[in-house]
Image: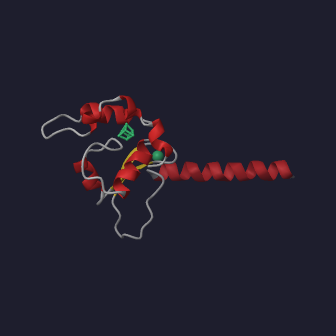
Amino acid sequence: MSDWTAKAACRSEPLRLFFPEVGMNPDHAIEVCGRCPVRAECLEFALNTGQQHGVWGGLTAYERKKQRSYRVIFCNVCARRFSWKPAESFQHPPVYCSDACRRSARLATHAAGYQRRKQSA
Ligand code: SF4
Ligand SMILES: [Zn+2]
């Protein structure tokens, strides 16, 4: 594993919480993941390496299994969590949750370009 594990919020937690036995509640582990700074890296690692057990990146094994048919994405503008289901496997995942966020990203790009032109004029 790469160095993201050094920043893992679960380092000081008992491992068994993250690998709950059948019938055990994973809520505490999920809560720890919620404030973990490397949640995205952790989830990506679990999905890429096909981890079959335990809580990784705030998702249980069952939730990760569902992730294979849809992806949870964080909007680049408002950071809202949304799910996306690819219609075709070669489709790229979207980076904005809505048209409003796409527009505001475009406006920000235009504004940055305008500033640059103004400064170089
Ligand atoms: S997301 Fe959860 S399981 Fe992954 S490193 Fe962070 S606390 Fe640990
Ligand atoms: Zn958004």
Q: Residue furthest right?
A: 121
Name the residue at 40% across, 46% down.
42
| Side (left or right) of 70 relative to 94 | left
Q: Residue furthest left?
A: 23
Q: Position of residue 114 (x, y in %)?
A: 74, 51
Identity of the residue drawn at 41% across and 71% down: 90
Residue at (45% x, 58% y) in the render: 94
Residue nearest the viewer, comparing 22 with 117? 22
Can residue 3 be seen in this snapshot? yes
Residue 116: give x, y in percent of width and height: 77, 50
Check the image and report above or below for 51 versus 29. below
Q: Position of residue 102 (x, y in %)?
A: 52, 53
* Residue 12 figure quarter: top left
Query: Residue at the location (41% across, 42% down)?
Result: 39
Residue closest to the eye, 2 or 114: 2
Rendering colour mode: secondary structure
Image position, residue 79 (x, y; %) = 47, 42
Q: Is residue 35 visible?
A: no
Total count of labels: 0
